[in-house]
Image (cartoon, coloured by chain):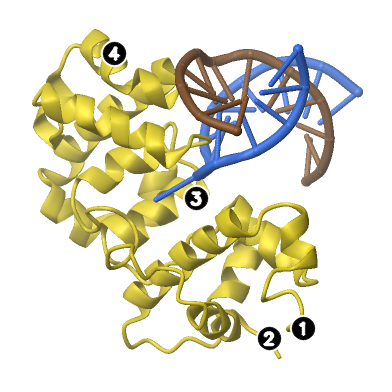
Chain colours: A yellow, B blue, C brown
Amino acid sequence: MIDTGHDLYLAVQKLDLLEKSPQFWWPNAYTFEVLVGAILTQNTQWKRVEESLINLRNNNILSLESLAATEIELLIECIRPSGFFKAKSKNIQTLCQNIISDFSDFYNFQQEVSREWLLSQRGIGPESADAILCYGCERGVMVVDKYTQQLTSALGWEFETYDDLQAWCMEGFVDDHLARELALFHGMIVEYMKRYKKGALVETSPLTSVR
DNA sequence: GGCCAGGTGTAAA
DNA sequence: TTTACACATGGC
């Protein structure tokens, strides 16, 4: 019986979906790259994000200082595979510049940034903000995405807002290791939904008989 | 050829 | 305060 987010966490965990994925699911979690990935992955497959990250690395501009200062045209060419390249390139560059001016460096940013500060940045909405907090800053914050909404909906819950769904997901967890458990929780949901999409989600997936 | 992918901002109803 | 649409690419 699943009543809380923590119940769902335990149920999904039994399916062992992250066996070959690295710890905490997001590649290079808790590093600067998470910031770039969080924006690049908006409405885009992660495979495209990886192409863009390789391009940035090959051009030696995958750092806070370089991205803040580089020619926007070069940035655009690097991230083109991820789509929405005009908006994303500008948003990434402005974010980097604002981090330097408000926090000096990425370490201070990790320690001090607030959700409100992130949400005030152009191109960062609730999901990107929470992804940066969870996977970039190791904060005990649950990332809620379309998959999370679809899964809980298939299990019979409906939530009014992003915040309501997020609060339900975090119910039942204790503070110990919260940041890392929630990081895994979101990753497991994504992997689960990739595996059981569409009709399979309702008809044959392991979780939908639970409730 | 249409739909989707680890969303967000904006304008109109 | 909701809803609809644009933003862009590549794979199926």
Kind of residue indicated by mark 3 = Glu
| Residue C10 on image: x %, y % | 46, 22
Q: CA distance from mark 4 to mark 2?
A: 46 Å
| Nearer to the camera, A48 or A100 | A48
Q: Which mark is residue A127?
A: 3
Determine whether the residue tagged by mark 2 lies in a helix, strand or loop.
Answer: loop
Q: Are marks 2 and 1 in contact (CB under 8 Å)?
A: yes
Judged by depth in the image, the label closer to the viewer, 2 or 3, is: 2
The answer for which chain carries disc 3 is A
Instruction: Name the residue furthest top.
Output: A73
Q: CA distance from mark 4 to mark 1?
A: 48 Å
**For the residues bearing labels 2 and 3, Cβ distance under 8 angstroms:** no
Please tell me how crowded label 1 is: few (under 14), some (14-19), or many (20+) other residues with Cα within 10 Å. Answer: few
Q: If the image is split into quadrants, where does the C terminus of chain A sit? A: bottom right
Disc 3 + disc 1, Cβ < 8 Å: no
Above or below — where is A97 with respect to A176? above
Examine the rendered structure and indicate whether residue A182 appears above or below residue A172: above
Q: Name which of mark 3 and mark 1 comes first in the sequence.
A: 3
Mark 4, mark 3: which one is toward the viewer? 4
- In the image, are marks 2 and 3 on the same chain? yes
| Marked residue nearer the N-terminal end (4 or 3) | 4
Task: Read off the residue under disc 2.
Answer: A2
Give whichever of discs 2 and 1 has the lower sequence position: 2
Q: Three-letter amino acid code at disc 2?
A: Ile
**Depth-wise, is mark 3 or mark 1 nearer the camera?**
1
Give the structural element (helix, strand or loop) at label 4.
helix
The reply to whether label 4 and label 3 mark residues of one chain is yes
Q: Which mark is residue A211?
A: 1
Name the residue beneath numbered marker 4: A77
Kindly check if marks 4 and 1 are in contact, taking CB atoms under 8 A apart as contact: no
